[in-house]
Amino acid sequence: MNPSIVMDRLRSWFVLIPLLLLLGAIYWLSQQVEPLPVKPDNSMRHDPDFMINQFTATTLNVQGKPQYVMSARKLIHYPDDNSTHVEAPALSSFEPDKPPLHIYADKGMMSGKGDEVFLHENVKIVRAASTDQSEMTFTTSYLHVIPDLGLAETDQPVMLVDERNIVRAIGMKFDSKAHIVKLLAQVRSQHVPKNP
């Protein structure tokens, strides 16, 4: 092969070498100044860390007898706010010398410490009959329960039904330990007389 032809070909390649070096330097520089990929901020996520289906939990009193029984179709715990959400919750309270109290709802949420329960949708409280009182049923759409204090309250419409009374009101405070029901506003009552 003729040396002048080889030199001509090399000269044409030498013109490209600075251009290739320049492209390499530009690529390297762009890699250095390009921001690092953003890691997702998982602190804003609300993902469960565990779920339990068909569960029942029982709290015993000092005598070793059931004081509270809570069950639900599904329990879901969220670690970001330490909340526990439940589907179809049922809470029962058993106090010595008092009729049992049962609370049901479609949905609920327990506080991180478990000392407060917030019930939503089709909330129903049933106080069992005793020797001197008939069964009493309360219905509402929302209920805030503090089990250890025996308190339940709502600011929503409520209906109370017992053997001879139907009472409607807006808002209610219920103290199961003192057996006191306080209706807050717009109270309407219908009394059915006892048959002779």
Image (tube, rainbow, N blue to C red):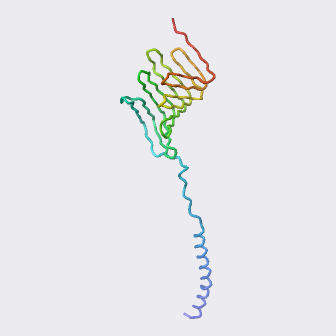
Residue 21: where, in percent of width, then height?
Answer: 59, 79
Which residue is farthest left?
Answer: 64
Residue 142: where, in percent of width, then height?
Answer: 56, 31
| Left or right of 186 on screen, residue 64 | left
Q: In the displayed structure, would residue 68 be above or below residue 162?
A: below
> What's the residue at 53%, 19% (across, down)?
161
Query: Is residue 81 or residue 50 the one in the foreground?
Result: 81
Which residue is farthest bottom?
Answer: 3
Which residue is farthest top?
Answer: 196
* Number of numbered labels in the structure image: 0
Q: Quadrant of residue 94?
A: top left
Query: Is residue 74 or residue 118 the one in the foreground?
Result: 118
Q: In the displayed structure, would residue 129 be above or below residue 119?
A: above
Query: Is residue 4 or residue 147 the one in the foreground?
Result: 147
Q: In the displayed structure, would residue 190 be above or below residue 57?
A: above
Residue 30: where, in percent of width, then height?
Answer: 60, 70
> What's the residue at 55%, 49% (across, down)?
44
> What's the residue at 52%, 9% (across, down)?
194
Q: Quadrant of the N terminus?
A: bottom right
Residue 6: where, in percent of width, then height?
Answer: 57, 91
> What's the residue at 56%, 18% (across, down)?
166
| Left or right of 181 on screen, residue 66 | left
Query: Is residue 13 or residue 170 the one in the foreground?
Result: 170
